[in-house]
Image: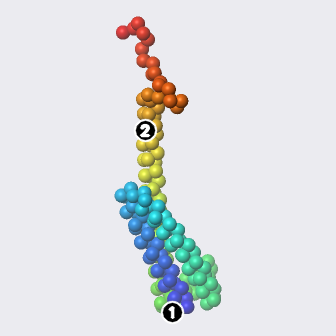
């Protein structure tokens, strides 16, 4: 039962990692439509992982194992070899997902900052070179020199 729960959670993290890889490619390629679709896939994968984590927690408690306990590693080693191996795989793949998600978040923040700067630049240029004001009337921009002066 515990091995089944660990395998299921590993599969869940593998699915999340595939979504994160696709998300990274979409961020690099600036594919906003794909990002929207992937955000929904990512939400579903994370919800599934939350469910699998609850199952794992119940299963661990059923065999008197608590990952928060100080002696968890020692008690884990008392389990069949397959349990310890699956636990190590689970921890490794979860770490990989966390790093990929962090990297994607950093990339997304960078893209957002770039887009924000570009929009501010375009907005400033539009305000300086506006032909019409917000009321639809033409705006005459005064020259930078006083009439009568060269």
Label 1 crowding class (10 Å Cα cut-off): few <14, some 14-19, many 20+?
Answer: few
Q: Nearer the viewer, residue 111 or 71?
A: 111
Can you tell which quarter of the image residue 26 is in?
Answer: bottom left
Is 45 left or right of 66, judged from the image as shown? left
Q: Is residue 27 visible?
A: no
The residue that mark 1 highlights is 80
Q: Residue at x 44, y 69 (%)?
A: 19
Q: Residues under labels 2 and 1: Cα distance?
A: 63 Å
Q: Give the vertical position of 98 relative to 27 (above or below).
A: below
Q: Residue at x 55, y 91 (%)?
A: 1
Mark closer to the observer (2, 1): 2
> What residue sits 52% from the left and 88% below the top?
4
Pinpoint residue 77: horizontal percent, then vertical percent. 52, 88
In the orientation shown, which residue stands out farthest toward the bottom?
Answer: 80
Quadrant of res 118:
top left
Checking the image for residue 26, the label placed there is none
Q: Is residue 131 visible?
A: yes
36 vs 68, left or right, is left
Residue drawn at x 44%, y 29% is 130
> Where residue 24 appears, x then y in whole percent?
40, 63
Is 121 drawn above or below residue 44 in the view shown?
Answer: above
Please say if the residues under marks 2 and 1 sit with CB atoms less than 8 Å apart. Answer: no
Q: Nearer the viewer, residue 135 or 150?
A: 135
Residue 110, x across and y down, in percent = 44, 52
Image spot of residue 20 (x, y percent): 43, 67
In the picture, which quadrant includes the C terminus?
top left
Q: Secondary structure at mark 2?
A: helix
Residue 122 - label:
2
User: Mark 2 or 1 closer to N-term?
Assistant: 1
């Amino acid at each position: 039962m515990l091995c089944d729960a660990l395998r299921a959670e590993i599969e869940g993290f593998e699915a999340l990692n595939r979504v994160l890889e696709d998300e990274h490619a979409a961020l690099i390629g600036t594919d906003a439509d794909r990002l929207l679709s992937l955000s929904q896939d990512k939400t579903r994968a994370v919800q599934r992982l939350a469910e699998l984590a609850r199952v794992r927690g119940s299963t661990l408690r059923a065999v008197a194992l608590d990952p928060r306990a100080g002696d968890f590693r020692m008690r884990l080693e008392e389990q069949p070899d397959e349990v310890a191996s699956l636990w190590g795989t689970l921890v490794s793949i979860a770490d990989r997902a966390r790093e990929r998600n962090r990297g994607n978040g950093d990339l997304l923040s960078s893209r957002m900052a770039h887009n924000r700067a570009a929009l501010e630049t375009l907005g400033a240029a539009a305000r300086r070179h506006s032909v019409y004001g917000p009321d639809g009337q033409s705006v005459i921009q005064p020259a930078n020199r006083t009439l009568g002066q060269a």
